[in-house]
Amino acid sequence: MAEARRIEVDEGWCIGCWECVELCPQTEGTQYPVFERGEKVPRVVNPQSCLGCLTCVENCRSLALTVDGRRWEGFVEPRARNKEEAIY
């Protein structure tokens, strides 16, 4: 079994847009999904399924995700501070 990656969702920053859940190649339609929809924010349920592709991190509008301590550095500020800003 693969070593589990350390995936963290910062609940204070997460706006609940669910893009990480929708875009993760190891979540939608897989037997052991990395993420599942929590009540307000995504929950990491099978970190050992993570490929380390960073798709979730690169597409996080609020910069709330880290994988093995890596946060997206392509933006200085979050692209959205609330769910309404996240929808375009």
Image (tube, helix red, strand yellow):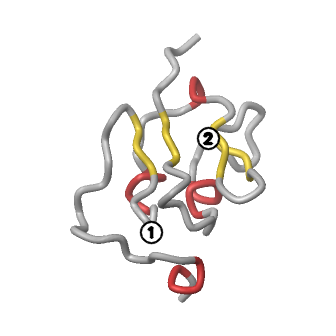
Q: Where does label 2 land, which residue?
A: 26
Q: Amino acid at mark 1?
A: Arg
Find disc 1 in the rendering and name its residue.
Answer: 61
**Residue occupying image coordinates x 58% and y 29%:** 47
What residue lies at 40% left-to-right and 44% top-to-bottom?
A: 66
Where residue 32 appears, as percent x and y from the top left, is 73, 31
- Judged by depth in the image, the label closer to the viewer, 1 or 2, is 1
Q: CA distance from mark 1 to mark 2?
A: 20 Å
Q: Residue furthest front?
A: 12
How packed is label 2: few (under 14 Cα within 10 Å), some, or many (20 or more)? many
Using residue 46 as the reference point, say whether residue 76 is left or right of it.
left
Q: Indicate the amino acid at tag 2.
A: Gln
Which quadrant would the N terminus be assigned to in this image? top right
Q: Is residue 19 above or below residue 10?
A: below
Q: Position of residue 26 (x, y in %)?
A: 61, 41
Q: Are marks 1 and 2 in contact (CB under 8 Å)?
A: no
Residue 37 relative to residue 17: left or right:
right
Mark 1 residue crowding within 10 angstroms, few (<14) / some (14–19) / many (20+): many
Rendered position, 29 above or below 86: above
Q: Residue furthest bottom?
A: 88
Q: Nearer the viewer, residue 51 or 5?
A: 5
Residue 6: percent from left, percent from top:
46, 29
The vertical placement of 33 against 64, above or below, is above
User: Which quarter of the figure has residue 63?
Assistant: bottom left
- Residue that sits furthest to the top in the current view: 1
Residue depicted at x 51% and y 85%: 85
Q: Residue at x 53, y 60 (%)?
A: 14
Q: Position of residue 75 (x, y in %)?
A: 25, 68
Task: Provide the secondary structure element on which disc 2 rests.
Answer: loop
Looking at the image, is mark 1 or mark 2 earlier in the sequence? Answer: 2
